[in-house]
Image (cartoon, rainbow, N blue to C red):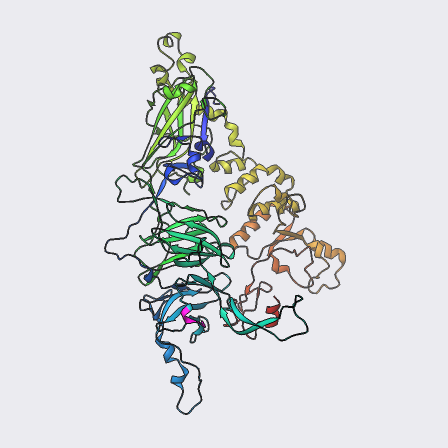
């Protein structure tokens, strides 16, 4: 309620907007936004929870390939990978060469060729008359298909001979050690046809055999599941209790794949494989017209999700820009579950590259049910050659010629062009707050304030109707209201900043952002209903954060003019509306005066006024302190002053500056009370506690009283070793301002006082999570802040290194 007695109804937040009705579909926005809502019945409204605004729906455009660009075919996918140093490898079009490109190279080059197998064969390099191997020479008439780089920096390439019967298997390259590849040969080459390879988090690899509809899983030592024939053994002393003959494995072990079949047992037409959530396997099947996603756990089918009619997209060739349901035919896919992946969208996200276009569709995937929800983000792929969509490092990558580009969200969005909503009306009056009810028959509704951003080219229009009976509102005609205008003085609510989160560093707001206002025209009745229409350009959309409908109109003629001015017209007469202009100006000023106490409260004072408020208490706020810390310090200034000059007060002040989260728990530095924070990283050590630990040089027999006087009124402030120079300087300034005037201090790192003979357990030391230890560099390292580093190759952490690692200890783990 303002100083004139007017009140307002407010709509703010997703729940409030969700009770409104979409005029196009007749459904409430909450129903349209629900996960169970059919995509075909979607709404043109969208709520952005990150910004806290209502806007036009962001559409996913279909990025059609240019007519001169050939369509993608399964043969264009040959396999690609990236190592830990940013080097890229892929199989060339001849399927006999592996191309490579380093991160700094201008162009790619041939990294390895099938011809190198024959050139490096020992039988060719052996001199006549010398001993050499008698094994078979490696095959030279082979084709390469499928490539992956493991987390242990091994490059694996699948191969298969052209002859029948043929040899098939995997080539293993050691990217760290170099040398010729190791051949992992499958016993039955005709039963193995590698198509796609994908690395796993444990250092292993998945191998998809599309021809035989199966997959293999190799661990970090490139071992895989197999079977071995068993034969009966002669009578033995111990055997099965039921008398059946004992059996034992015999003969060579044969690799055994996991079959890929749907729920009816039909083999899949798999085109790609990826490690899925919780150690499972995701397989993309290319069916007629759309793809299907499968999840397998050790060959057992968990769920099936067809990618049919799962994307609501807009075809740029459609002049009406009508969203339609789109079925996705995937060419390749990748699944980013989490660290180290961070983008382009927050993981976990499933990315599927469209075979009919040059874009990627991102999905949220439910690992238990397989339900997918498409993101609205536009992820284009410029002139994608279709080799692969590679999961590597922090994101996903695709090939552009002989370069590799990270997948990114296209920032220029496409929005729906228009949308209309209607505020809720509860004729039965069963849901409090759903209807704008003034509880005043014949109420003259006053103003409508909308916190919105209306970019150039977009528009926001309002219509309204009112009646004393909510059941009759639908029979009333809509009345057009004036076009809202942007208030120059900010929101009408005193000392509030509705758009504080959108302010730029210099304090300004984006153009056309603020509180928009209109004066209701001809809206008289107890209940009111609003119709708001947003119109966009297709490239931009208005943003609507909240609205406030004020009532009743404060009458200047009735309160301040003679009666002759009030008896000739109705309650919404011209004079009332004319005098509403100065009323709005003066009411805003009176409101600020009425709520002046908000300026004296650290929780509600404007950010720019915090230094002024702190000056009332003699506080000087450093510019490095963020707003939350400033408000906390001012709110608890009485507590800080009561503890000023004490060790707990000094530690609490330092924690306000250094702790990542600041609340009342900073006053409990030991962390003993219920709900207390972790022990403080700041320690204050009074030197008299260590007076007998290490006497000054040359004063071994110093008198105890003299020693006490030498250590009295002196203390050390111990700070973490990874504190920056600016932060350490700030600590020094804080301690100098908060300590007693007769004391002296030094700010030291924790390791500076970690000296044998002086450090005391529990006083100078504390068991906490320390900084990450790094190799010591001679001449610049700090004792106890690192470890002696290994030279290459002994610095390799993802391998077992001879003369460094104890094999027995590793097996024990």
Q: Main secondary structure of the magenta part?
A: loop
Q: In the image shown, does 388 or 771 lie closer to the viewer?
A: 388
Q: Which percent across, then down, holds residue 777?
A: 53, 67
| Residue 623, magenta (yes or no) | no
Q: In the image shown, does 192 or 705 lie closer to the viewer?
A: 192
Q: Is residue 765 left or right of residue 257?
A: right
Point out the residue furthest to the front here.
243
Can residue 806 be seen from the camera position used here?
A: no
Q: Which percent across, then down, holds residue 55?
A: 38, 37
Can residue 351 be seen from the camera position used here?
A: yes
Q: Which percent across, then down, holds residue 234?
A: 62, 76
Residue at x 31%, y 41% (from the top left corner): 539
Residue 599 in the image: above or below residue 50: above
Q: Which residues are magenta?
A: 186-190
Total number of numbered labels? 0
Q: Which percent across, then down, holds residue 716?
A: 64, 54
Point out the residue furthest to the bottom here.
129
The answer to which quarter of the image holds residue 489 is: top left
Q: In the image shown, does 695 or 510 lie closer to the viewer?
A: 510
Q: Is residue 590 left or right of residue 312?
A: right
Point out the residue furthest to the left here.
68
Q: Is residue 307 left or right of residue 223?
A: left
The answer to which quarter of the image holds residue 652 is: top right
Residue 401 in the image: above or below residue 143: above
The C terminus is located in which quarter? bottom right
Q: Is residue 593 left or right of residue 540?
A: right
Residue 461 in the image: above or below residue 625: above
């Amino acid at each position: 309620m303002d100083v004139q007695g007017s009140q307002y109804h407010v709509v703010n937040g997703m729940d409030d907007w969700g009770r409104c009705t979409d005029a196009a579909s007749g459904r409430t926005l909450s129903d349209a936004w629900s996960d169970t809502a059919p995509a075909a019945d979607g709404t043109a409204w969208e709520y952005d929870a990150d910004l806290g605004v209502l806007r036009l729906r962001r559409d996913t455009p279909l990025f059609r390939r240019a007519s001169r660009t050939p369509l993608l075919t399964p043969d264009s996918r040959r396999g690609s990978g990236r190592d830990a140093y940013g080097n890229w490898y892929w199989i060339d079009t001849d399927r006999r060469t592996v191309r490579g490109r380093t991160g700094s190279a201008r162009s790619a080059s041939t990294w390895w060729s099938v011809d190198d197998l024959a050139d490096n064969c020992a039988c060719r390099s052996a001199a006549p008359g010398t001993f050499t191997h008698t094994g078979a020479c490696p095959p030279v008439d082979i084709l390469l298909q499928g490539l992956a780089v493991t987390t242990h920096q091994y490059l694996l390439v699948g191969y298969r001979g052209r002859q029948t019967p043929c040899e098939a298997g995997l080539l293993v390259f050691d990217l760290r050690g170099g040398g010729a590849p190791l051949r992992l040969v499958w016993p039955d080459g005709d039963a193995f046809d590698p198509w796609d390879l994908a690395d796993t988090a444990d250092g292993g690899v998945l191998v998809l055999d599309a021809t035989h509809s199966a997959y293999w899983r190799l661990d970090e030592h490139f071992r895989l599941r197999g079977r071995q024939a068993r034969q009966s053994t002669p009578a033995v002393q111990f055997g099965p209790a039921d008398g059946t003959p004992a059996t034992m494995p015999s003969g060579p072990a044969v690799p055994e794949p996991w079959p890929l079949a749907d729920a009816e047992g039909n083999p899949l037409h798999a085109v790609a494989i990826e490690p899925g959530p919780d150690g499972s396997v995701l397989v993309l099947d290319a069916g007629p017209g759309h793809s299907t996603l499968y999840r397998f756990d050790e060959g057992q089918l968990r769920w099936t999700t067809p990618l049919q009619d799962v994307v609501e997209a807009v075809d740029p060739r459609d002049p009406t820009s009508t969203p339609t349901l789109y079925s996705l035919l995937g060419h390749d896919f990748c699944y980013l579950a989490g660290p180290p992946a961070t983008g382009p969208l927050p993981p976990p996200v499933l990315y599927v590259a469209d075979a009919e276009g040059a874009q990627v569709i991102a999905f949220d995937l439910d690992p238990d049910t397989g339900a997918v929800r498409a993101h609205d983000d536009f992820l284009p792929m410029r002139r994608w050659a279709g080799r692969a969509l590679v999961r590597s490092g922090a994101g996903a990558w695709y090939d552009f010629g002989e370069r590799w580009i990270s997948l990114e969200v296209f920032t220029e969005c496409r929005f729906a062009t228009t949308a209309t909503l209607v505020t809720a009306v509860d004729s039965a009056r069963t849901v409090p707050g759903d209807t704008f009810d003034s509880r005043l028959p014949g109420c003259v509704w006053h103003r409508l304030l909308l916190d919105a951003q209306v970019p150039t080219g977009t528009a926001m229009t309002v219509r309204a109707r009112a009646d004393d009976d909510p059941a009759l509102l639908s029979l009333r005609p809509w009345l057009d209201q004036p076009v809202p205008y942007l208030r120059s003085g900010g929101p009408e609510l005193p000392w509030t900043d509705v758009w504080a989160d959108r302010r730029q560093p210099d304090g300004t707001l984006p153009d056309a952002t603020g509180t928009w206002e209109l004066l209701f025209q001809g809206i008289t009745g107890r209940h009111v209903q609003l119709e708001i229409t947003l119109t966009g350009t297709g490239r931009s959309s208005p943003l609507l954060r909240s609205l406030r409908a004020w009532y009743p109109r404060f009458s200047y003629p009735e309160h301040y003019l003679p009666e002759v001015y009030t008896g000739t017209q109705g309650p919404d007469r011209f004079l009332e509306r004319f005098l509403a202009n100065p009323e709005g100006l003066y009411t805003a000023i009176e409101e600020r005066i009425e709520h002046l106490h908000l300026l004296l409260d650290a929780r509600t004072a404007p950010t720019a006024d915090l230094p002024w408020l702190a000056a009332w208490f003699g506080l000087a706020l450093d510019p490095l302190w963020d707003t939350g810390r400033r408000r906390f310090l001012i709110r608890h200034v009485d507590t800080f002053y009561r503890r000023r000059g004490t060790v707990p007060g000094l530690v609490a002040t330092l924690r306000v500056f250094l702790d990542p989260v600041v609340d009342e728990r900073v006053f409990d530095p030991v962390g003993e009370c219920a709900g207390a924070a972790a022990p403080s990283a700041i320690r204050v050590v009074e030197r008299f506690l260590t007076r007998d630990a290490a006497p000054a040089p040359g004063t071994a027999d110093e008198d105890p009283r003299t020693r006490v006087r030498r250590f009295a009124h002196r203390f050390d402030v111990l700070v973490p070793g990874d504190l920056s120079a600016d932060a350490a300087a700030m600590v020094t300034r804080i301690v100098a301002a908060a300590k007693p005037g007769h004391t002296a201090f030094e700010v030291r790192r924790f390791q500076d006082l970690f000296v044998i003979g002086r450090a005391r357990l529990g006083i100078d030391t504390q068991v906490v999570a320390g900084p990450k230890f790094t190799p010591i560099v001679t001449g610049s390292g700090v004792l106890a802040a690192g470890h002696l580093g290994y030279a290459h190759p002994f610095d390799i952490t993802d391998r077992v290194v001879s003369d460094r690692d104890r094999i027995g200890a590793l097996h024990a783990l």
